Structures are given as C-alpha cells and as structure tokens.
Amino acid sequence: MHRNRCWYPQSDRQRAVRCSRRGSRKRTAAFSPLPRALLAVVLAAAVLHPAPLVAQSTPSQGPGWFIPGAPQHPAPAPAPHPAAAPAPPHPAPASLPALPPVPQLPALPKGAAPPPAVMGVLSVPDVYRQSTAVQGMEKIINARRNTLSQDAVKEQDVWRQMQASLAAERAKLTPAEIRARETALQNRITQAQKEFAGRNQQIQEAAQYAIDEVNRMLVAVIRQVAESRGMNLVLHREQVALNMNTYDITDEVALQLNKVLPKITVLPDSEMPIGPPVAAAAPGNGLMTEAAPAPTGPLPLPPVAPPGSPAKP
C-alpha cells in the first residue's frame, strides 16, 4: 500500500495537483513487474526493432505496422481478377448419315443337311519330318547355301588382298593410278554383291518350287487317307485340346506320302529365274514354306582406304 505524501511548500491547489500526479506514477510502478531499467531496455528494443503486428497498411500508419492509438481502417478488398475468356467451343463433328434398315430377305428353299461329322486329326510338321522327299530336298538346299557362303568368304579374301596391295604400293603410284585401282576394287565389290544376292535368291526359288510340289501331293494324300477311313473333317492336331489316338492319321499319311513321292528333284539354281522375293504362304494353312534364310554371304564391304591414308592391318 502506497501513501501519497505531499511535502512541497506550495499552495494547496498546487500541492493537490502534485500529489495526484505522484500517486499516479506510483500506481503505475506498482503494477509493473519489471524494474525501471529493464523496462527502459525493452521499450528501446521495441522502438529500434518493431515487430509487424498488422499485415495491412492504413493512411495513418506505415505499411505492415501496428501503431497504438492510430485509427484502424479495414484493409481494402483485393481487386478482382478479370475472368479468363471462355475457350471457343470445338466444332461438333458432322454426324454420319444413319444406316439404312436391313432389308427383309426372302427365305431360301430347304437344302440337304450335311452329314454327321466324322473327324480326324493330323500333324503336318510331323509328316514333313517323316517325309523322305523333304529330307532329301533339305540336304540339297543346305549344300547349295554352304557353297554360296564359301564363295563369299573367298571373294572377301581377294578384296582384302587387293586393298593390302594398294596400300603397300601407294607411295610408288601416281594419284591417277591410285584412283583407277580404287575404282576397280569398288566395282568388283559391287558386282560380287549383286552376284551373291542373285544366287541366294535362286536357291530360295528352287527350295520353294520343291516345297510347293510336296504340298500339292500332301493334300491329295490327306484326302485319300481320310476317304479310306470314312472321315469328312480333318483338323490340325495342334488345334485340338484332346483326342483319341484312333482319330490321328499322321503316321498313315506320312507312310502313304513316302510311297507316292519318295524323293523330289530340286531344279538347278541356273534354271531358276531371278525375280521378286519368294512370297510366304498364308498363315494357318499348315503347309511348309521356304522362309528366306539369314544371309550367309557376302559379308559387309571392307572399307577402301582413300588416297594418302595408311592401310589398316
């Protein structure tokens, strides 16, 4: 409890004013929990480093600062953003004309019903594996391909020898002679490539011609065996999930094919025309076709060294 003592030797009115001011200061100090020195430091720090308390600014105060006692004005509403112009609508696709109604077709006269199905199954790949004609044809074609590959390797050796000889004698030759020998080597390589490509195509044509003959005879044999067994529907065995062995006529067809076509003559390559590549048979017919083999020769061209460059070993 603070006592208000006024000891100034002044008039009563002045003494009353002094006492009221002194009592007000004492009451303020009584309610302050900090010493006056510490309070002065805190106030000085607040003045030097004010903290933003209000985000908006008003005309009577700085931007972003709160000033006690200053009139508070509501923050102005943000300006509305202009609405984006709507995208132009896509043009509607032109509607197709309506399909005409299905006409009412007249009934056909009654025909004879098909007979009950008597089925059999057959594996064409197994027939080819057992065919002596196909086995002999494959041996002939493989031998011709091996010969072509050996000839291509020999020709490549000649190319390398010509290139090495040109590199060794380059210093003794004139530029005209170097260009002439390089041109001769390049022409030989181009001509050899055309020749090997033509021979390879002739081999394919000969193989396809022989296989076509086997397929033609195979269809006749299948019909012959099926009629002898009373079958009117023969399916590929690979398309059937389950069947009894009595339905399988593979071995019987292979045996009969070897009787009527034990071997086949493969025409020489020289008799086969050079035309467009052999067209493969339609998929799913089950008959074998001669696919184009991987090129066995010639190999890629050896690079011809330009004039003045050293030869590679």
Image (cartoon, helix red, strand yellow):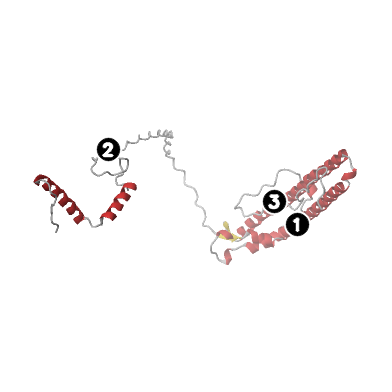
Seen in the picture, residue 191 relative to 210 is either above or below; the reply is: above
Pointer 3 local density, CA inside 10 Å: few below 14, some 14–19, many at least 20? some
Residue 5 falls left or right of residue 227: left
Q: Nearer the viewer, mark 2 or mark 1?
A: 2
Camera-side residue: 11 or 47? 11
Camera-side residue: 190 or 248? 190
Identify residue type, mark 1: Asn
Circles 1 and 3, Cβ within 8 Å, touching? The answer is: no
Residue located at (31% from left, 38% from top): 78
> Circle 3 is placed at which residue position?
292
Q: Which mark is residue 15?
A: none
Residue 252 in sight: yes
Residue located at (49% from left, 48% from top): 111
Residue 230 in sight: no
Pointer 2 local density, CA inside 10 Å: few below 14, some 14–19, many at least 20? few
Q: CA distance from mark 1 to mark 3?
A: 13 Å
Camera-side residue: 58 or 230? 58
Tally of numbered discs: 3
Seen in the picture, residue 53 relative to 100 is either above or below; the reply is: below
> Circle 2 is placed at which residue position?
60
Camera-side residue: 132 or 11? 11
Residue 251 falls left or right of residue 35: right
Q: Quadrant of residue 172?
A: top right
The N terminus lies in quadrant = bottom left
Q: Earlier in the sequence, mark 1 or mark 3?
A: 1
Q: CA distance from mark 2 to mark 1?
A: 104 Å
| Residue 2 placement (x, y as % from top left) | 14, 57
Q: CA distance from mark 2 to mark 3?
A: 94 Å
Circles 2 and 3, Cβ within 8 Å, touching? The answer is: no
Q: Quadrant of residue 3?
A: bottom left
Q: Which mark is residue 142?
A: 1
Identify residue type, mark 2: Ser
